[in-house]
């Protein structure tokens, strides 16, 4: 979002359709797309946020969504049958949790707009019935959103289970002190796997660790408790009396 000098979300609706417009402006001379003006129907927004699709089209304006990254690009089909061409694009981070909040606000606004239309079937009071609600994302709003929301922003907790937990903790502490850089890098890598399942600072992922002979068995779990990966942290240098730790999945 920082790529934009101005950023607005416009929630609109009428009897025919509901839609959300993303409008962004960039400084003079910025490379790639200078402006973004992209219209998403309610159905398109729902599918993108739910992860049912990762692309949407607004005429020759296109967007591809992967995680937090929204890549806007203008794609006009060339007239020739073959060849190469260039297109301007802009990749920005619109955190998934933040966009879900925008979606919730849009749903509520569309509901209020529909209720107002239903209460006035003859259209006698359209002059005091808003047809567009604009969210102005100031620099302060942008910084707060990017600080609070985004993949990998959460915490990771080590869970030692109920079986010989004290033995595992003692061995882990010993390896942290004496296992060298390879052990600590391996432990960090496992925690990073779990942390990447978080999407805001309010979420907490978990790594379950247990002693496994002269190494460790681990499971990375999402904030909801779902296991996403498991494996071991193994010391390949143990037989020679040294330390050469690595992560196995």
Image (cartoon, grey):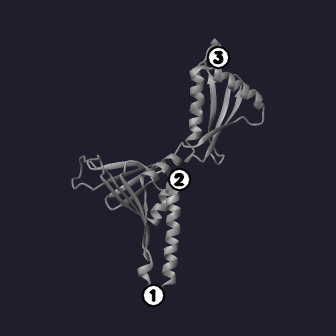
Q: Nearer the viewer, residue 79 or 200?
A: 200
Front tag of 3 and 1: 1
Secondary structure type for disc 1: loop
Earlier along the polypeptide chain: callout 3 or callout 1? Answer: 1
| Front-most of residues 24 and 172 | 24
What is the C-alpha distance between the residues marked 3 and 1? Answer: 82 Å
Q: CA distance from mark 2 to mark 3?
A: 44 Å
Which residue matches tag 3?
A: 238
Q: Position of residue 25 (x, y in %)?
A: 33, 55
The local secondary structure at tag 3 comes to: helix
The residue shown at (65%, 14%) is 239
Residue 12 % position (x, y): 43, 69
Q: Nearer the viewer, residue 243 or 76?
A: 243
Secondary structure found at label 2: helix
Label ID, residue 177: none
Quadrant that contains the C terminus:
top right
List the residue tagged with mark 1. Answer: 122
Determine which of the numbered discs, if any, sits on residue 97 in the image.
Answer: 2
Which residue extends farthest front?
140
Answer yes or no: is residue 52 visible.
no
- Give the percent coordinates (x, y) of residue 114: 50, 76
Is 13 displayed left or right of 5 in the figure?
right
Q: Nearer the viewer, residue 242 or 176?
A: 176
Vertically, is 121 above or below 139? below
Q: Residue at x 52, y 77 (%)?
A: 115
Q: Quadrant of residue 58?
A: bottom left
In the shown orientation, is residue 37 left or right of residue 181? left
Of discs 2 and 3, which sits in the foreground? 2
Residue 232 screen position, x and y as percent:
64, 30
Label 1 and label 2: CA atoms lie apart by 39 Å
């Amino acid at each position: 979002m920082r790529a934009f000098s101005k950023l607005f979300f416009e929630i609109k609706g009428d009897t025919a359709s509901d839609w959300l417009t993303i409008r962004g402006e960039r400084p003079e001379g910025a490379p790639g797309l200078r402006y973004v003006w992209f219209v998403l129907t309610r159905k398109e927004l729902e599918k993108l946020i739910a992860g049912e699709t990762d692309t949407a089209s607004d005429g020759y304006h296109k967007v591809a969504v992967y995680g937090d990254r929204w890549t806007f690009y203008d794609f006009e089909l060339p007239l020739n049958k073959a060849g190469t061409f260039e297109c301007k694009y802009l990749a920005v981070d619109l955190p998934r949790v933040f966009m879900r909040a925008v979606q919730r606000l849009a749903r509520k606004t569309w509901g209020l707009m529909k209720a107002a239309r239903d209460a006035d079937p003859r259209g006698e009071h359209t002059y005091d019935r808003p047809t567009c609600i604009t969210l102005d994302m100031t620099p302060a709003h942008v910084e707060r959103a990017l600080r609070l929301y985004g993949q990998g922003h959460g915490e990771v907790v080590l869970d030692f289970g109920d079986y010989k937990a004290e033995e595992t903790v003692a061995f882990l502490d010993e390896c942290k002190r004496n296992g060298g850089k390879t052990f600590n890098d391996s432990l960090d890598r496992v925690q990073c796997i779990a942390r990447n399942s978080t999407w805001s600072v309010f979420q907490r992922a978990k790594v379950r660790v247990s002693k496994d002979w002269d190494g460790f068995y681990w499971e990375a779990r999402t904030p909801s408790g779902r296991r996403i990966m498991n494996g071991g942290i193994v010391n390949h240098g143990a037989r020679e009396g040294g330390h050469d730790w690595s992560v196995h999945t």
